[in-house]
Amino acid sequence: MPLYRPSELTAFLEKEGLHAKKALSQNFLIDGNLVKRILEDANVQEGDVILEIGPGPGVLTEALLEKNVDLYAVEKDHKFAKLLPRLTENKEGGRLTVFEEDALKFDLVSFEKSIKPKKAKLIANLPYNITTPILTHYVKAKDCFEKLVVMVQAEVADRITSKPSTKEYGSITVFLNFFSNPSFCFKVKKQSFIPAPSVDSAVIKLDLKDPPLTSVEEQEMFFQIVRGGFSQRRKMLRTSLKSLFPHVDWNQALISIGINELSRPENLSLQDFLNLYQSVKKEFPLP
Ligand code: SAM
């Protein structure tokens, strides 16, 4: 009996003496249709290399192994990590390698070497307390991952996939669009988990791409402008940036790229921010 059935999951947790830990954002999926849709949206094929963050009891893990994939699972909770090998014992299906680790400290360099020349797909029902650090870390690893397909809080999904000039659009949107093409897959009700989280969720997909600026120094400078611009989002962009970089004539810089000088940060697309960066980089070198 698969783990996505509430009775099966509860029986498993009881048998092993396990309880969902809030500190590790443990909300377990109990909807087989959603598991199927996540695998479909990730286009999981036999032989794929998959990295799953936070497998927990293993509802997604089990479904992935049935697809005959090469699965690497990174789980911080010792009790869950040590129970995962049961999913491949005396069973045909994919290969499972478990790392009992913090996904934020997972060694991506070694992982990339071990799977080369293939690239992996990252699939996860993410621990919501570390959604942003996980995404900002893994989205940069385009030599390692083809795409990230992840369950996040609905409000975070809206922010990541939002368009300029909306209230959801912010520096995280620009950041993730810089390294990937994000898309919204589907919304998930809180009742689809045990225990139910306090908010609804959504699955999003980030197709990783070559970033428009390759040097790390340039990227840092660019994101200083983006973060600085959004630091006071009710203010005009030129006001926030002037207080951070007073030597630059932001009025003129905005006009030179064809943007109204009274614009607020949310009015600028990723390309507008890139144009602004190129314009100030040329004419007014940053400190
Ligand atoms: N995949 C399971 C499911 O969908 O039912 C569990 C998802 S639950 C939302 C998040 C999982 O991430 C938990 O198993 C939790 O122990 C694990 N986790 C939390 N913080 C982690 C971290 N820093 N590194 C790796 N795993 C973590």
Image (tube, helix red, strand yellow):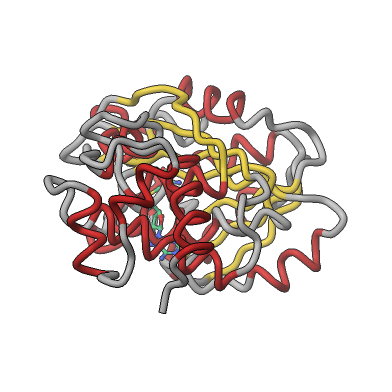
Residue 93 % position (x, y)? 76, 40
Q: Residue at x 22, y 37 (%)?
A: 196
Q: Determine the residue located farthest toward the left in the rendered image.
A: 234
Location of residue 194 with respect to 102 vertically, above or below: above
> As rendered, which of 263 and 154 lies closer to the eye?
263
Q: Determine the residue located farthest toward the bottom in the rendered image.
A: 287
Residue 2 % position (x, y)? 51, 32
Location of residue 249 with respect to 187 vertically, above or below: below
Q: Residue at x 62, y 51 (%)?
A: 211
Corner quadrant of residue 96 = bottom right
Location of residue 166 with respect to 264 vertically, above or below: above
Q: Is residue 153 left or right of residue 233?
A: right
> As rendered, which of 85 and 43 lies closer to the eye?
43
> As rendered, which of 144 and 106 lies closer to the eye?
144
Q: Residue at x 65, y 61 (%)?
A: 214
Q: Is residue 111 left or right of residue 81?
A: right
Residue 46 % position (x, y)? 79, 34
Corner quadrant of residue 280 = bottom left
Quadrant of the frame with the C terminus: bottom left
Q: Is residue 231 left or right of residue 256?
A: left
Q: Is residue 235 left or right of residue 277?
A: left
Residue 234 % position (x, y)? 12, 45
Asked if residue 57 shows in the view, the reply is: no
Circle count: 0
Corner quadrant of residue 157 = top left
Q: Residue at x 87, y 55 (%)?
A: 117
Asked if residue 69 shows in the view, the reply is: yes
Q: Which quarter of the rendered image does ligand 1 occupy? A: bottom left
Location of residue 12 with respect to 103 vertically, above or below: above
